[in-house]
């Protein structure tokens, strides 16, 4: 009787062992698939890192070029500022001359008015003298 029990137990253990082996094989296949998936993800991330590094380099180069351009613009603005100050000084001198000229015109206007009044008075007096 005992021999039969050993065989029966061995058969059950063999089937259990086969099921366990099959389960581990399925798990191995799944882990292999996951490994492939993670490998593909790693390659994608590597590609993205390379692209980002290229973009970073391009950005750095553009930043340097932009910095150089801003430096040139700054120099030009300083030159324009110097020219603007020179123009301001010239305009201030012209303003002073125009104020002097304005004073001369005011005096000339007074002379013209006095001359007109004098000529009018002289004309009226001459008219009165000659006609009375």
Image: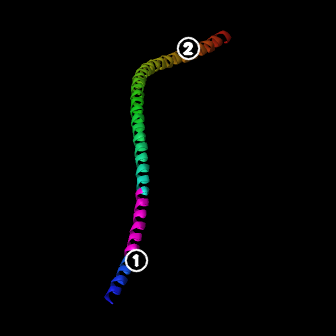
Q: Position of residue 74 (x, y in %)?
A: 39, 29
Left or right of 30? Residue 105 is: right
Q: Secondary structure at mark 2?
A: helix
Residue 15: assigned label? 1
Q: How many marks?
A: 2
Q: Quadrant of residue 66?
A: top left
Q: Tell me which secondary structure the magenta stretch mostly adopts.
A: helix
| First in sequence: mark 1 vs mark 2 | 1
Near-viewer residue (4 or 58)? 4
Q: Position of residue 99 (x, y in %)?
A: 45, 21
Q: Position of residue 124 (x, y in %)?
A: 62, 15
The residue sitting at the right extreme is 131
Q: Residues within 10 Å of mark 1 (few under 14, many from 20)?
A: few
Where 14 falls versus 113 (above or below)? below
Image quarter (top left, top right, bottom left or bottom right) of the C terminus: top right
The residue under the point 43% across, 47% down is 48
Which residue is under mark 2? Answer: 115
The residue under the point 36% across, 82% down is 7
Q: Position of residue 39 (x, y in %)?
A: 41, 53
Image quarter (top left, top right, bottom left or bottom right) of the N terminus: bottom left
Please name which of the two marks, 1 or 2, marks the residue nearer to the observer. Answer: 1
Near-viewer residue (16 or 113)? 16
Gap between marks 1 and 2 measured at Cα: 140 Å
Q: Secondary structure at mark 1?
A: helix
The residue under the point 64% across, 13% down is 128
The residue under the point 41% across, 38% down is 59
Look at the image and say whether residue 33 sits in the magenta stretch: yes
Where 53 falls versus 3 (above or below)? above
| Residues rendered magenta in the picture | 15-35
Q: Quadrant of residue 90?
A: top left
The residue sitting at the left extreme is 2
Residue 34: assigned label? none
């Amino acid at each position: 009787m005992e021999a039969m029990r050993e065989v029966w137990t061995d058969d059950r253990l063999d089937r259990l062992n086969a099921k366990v082996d099959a389960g581990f094989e399925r798990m191995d296949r799944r882990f292999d698939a996951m490994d492939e998936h993670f490998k593909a993800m790693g390659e994608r991330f590597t590609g993205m890192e390379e692209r980002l590094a290229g973009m970073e380099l391009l950005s750095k180069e553009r930043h340097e070029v932009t910095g150089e351009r801003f430096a040139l613009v700054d120099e030009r603005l300083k030159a324009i500022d110097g020219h603007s100050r020179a123009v301001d000084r010239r305009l201030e001198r012209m303003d002073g001359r125009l104020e002097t000229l304005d004073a001369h015109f005011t005096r000339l206007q007074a002379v013209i008015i006095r001359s007109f009044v004098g000529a009018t008075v002289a004309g009226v007096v001459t008219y009165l003298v000659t006609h009375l």
